[in-house]
Amino acid sequence: MKVQEVILRAMAKRITWWQAAEIIGISERHMRRWRERYEAFGYDGLFDRRRGTPSPKRVPLAQVEQVLGLYREKYFDLNVRHFHEKLREEHQVELSYTWVKLALQGAGLVPRGRKRGVHRKRRPRRALPGMLLHIDGSRHRWFQDERWHDLIVILDDASSEIYYAQLVEEESTVTVMAGLKEVIQRKGVFCALYSDRGSHFWLTPKVGGRVDPHRLTQVGRALRELGVQMIPAYSPQARGRSERNFGTWQGRLPQELRLRGIPTLEAANTFLREHYVAEFNRRFQVQAAERGSAFVTRTGRDLDLIFSLQFERTVNRDNTVNFQNLGLQIEPVRWRASLAGCTVMVHQHLDGTLSMTHGPHRLGHYSAQGAAIRPTKMAARRAMEKTRGGKVQKPTFPPRLEIPQTARDSHFPTAPATAAINSNRTSHVLRKPDVLTC
């Protein structure tokens, strides 16, 4: 180590002054002289051995000790950039980022950065927001304890704007669908989605091989219904923009949760939605190359049905459907006498409820336990139960027209009718002689 690093570590109380003298190879008395010289002249007093007026640009020893003490006691888990921002905003310490980084590295409080590898060329960003979105999950100890959680993030390739960030127990089909559904509801339908080859995004017949674009997962089926193209990534370097974004998340979010005293998953997600995502976008969002947006407003599509787990089932003879040890009863419909033998689609929604459809028709909505929530009402026809013989009385089709019968004349007229007839005959006989006489 250099002499400067040893002195800084002694000032940061990583080692004692006696240990510093032993490392450098000088006596304790001489180390006290060096310490006094450092307090009086800073770095110049140690290396240049100059006497007289100290440099006007040197940092006072009290401020050096303040910076090292703040990092050691309060901000010990922040990265250098994050710590430098806290110094400026909350402690009004106007030191350069380079000085703070060298001081922390020299004191041994932060490790030195590793040497960069070979030069790689970045893929240019898309021109408009909504042309390409990244989705990925990062498993990390976000609460700085033994608990592991996944952070699901959806960001735009054109501007690095975060559209969705949520902490979940584990990344899965349901959690991914919930994020995509929320983004489409707020922003609209986008053009393409860039993701890894997780089992909830793609089916990979051979481990490490190419994905099968024809065998769709639940997520792939939902995005195909919306017309969104899915792009698989075959290496972490291909998702470099998303990977670098997660490096920033891991270096900032756990410390922000600790400083605000947030220990639970629900409180952390509330903090993300209401405060931190907006602050993250304010610091790291960039301007897109062109003005405008490639998002398309969703019209005429039921996102609750699209973003659900869909399973085909065949209706039993008693108009029930078996699904996950549940018996879902189908209520009577107006357009068909019975649905027995028909193929229906059971939708398992993100909130756990179930619904059933047959083509464009909705057959029912059920709770997670299989109880009907909104049964379909039908007054024109009632459900029929089979008799003991197994036969059902079928109504005629088309239905017979019931014409009300009118009162017909009887062969034996009543008294009023007889009187009327006799009067007519009498009048006819009386008029007849007049005609003959004439």
Image (cartoon, grey):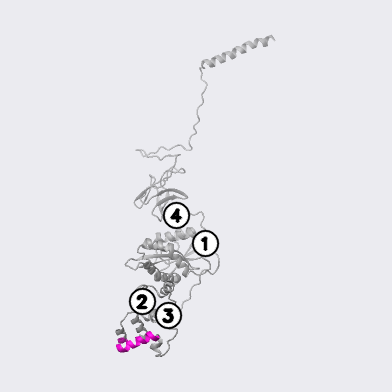
Tell me if label 1 and label 2 are in contact, CB under 8 Å.
Answer: no
In 3D space, how far apart are the residues under numbered discs 1 and 4 (Cα atoms)?
20 Å
Mark 4 highlights which residue?
A: 304
Q: Could you tell me how far apart the alpha carbons at marks 3 and 4 are, in whole angstroms?
A: 54 Å
Q: Which residues are magenta?
A: 21-41
Residue 295: mark in rendering: 1
Which comes before the other along the chain, label 1 or label 4?
1
Residue type at the position of mark 3: Trp
Q: Main secondary structure of the magenta part?
A: helix
Give whichever of discs 2 and 3 has the lower sequence position.
2
Q: Nearer the viewer, residue 261 or 168?
A: 261
User: Earlier along the polypeptide chain: callout 1 or callout 3?
Assistant: 3
Q: Nearer the viewer, mark 2 or mark 3?
A: 2
Which residue has dot 3 on it?
99
Q: Of helix, strand and loop, which one carries label 4?
A: helix
Identify residue type, mark 1.
Phe
The answer to whether any part of residue 409 appears in the image is: yes
For marks 1 and 2, give the CA distance: 49 Å
Q: Amino acid at mark 2?
A: Gly
Is 82 left or right of 299, judged from the image as shown?
A: left
Q: Dot 1: few (<14), some (14–19), or many (≥20) neighbours within 10 Å?
A: some
Q: Which residue is mark 2?
A: 69
Circle 1 — which element? loop
- Give whichever of discs 1 and 2 has the lower sequence position: 2
Amino acid type, residue under disc 4 in the picture: Asp
Position of the C terminus, as image quadrant, is top right
Please provide percent x and percent y for residue 197. 41, 66
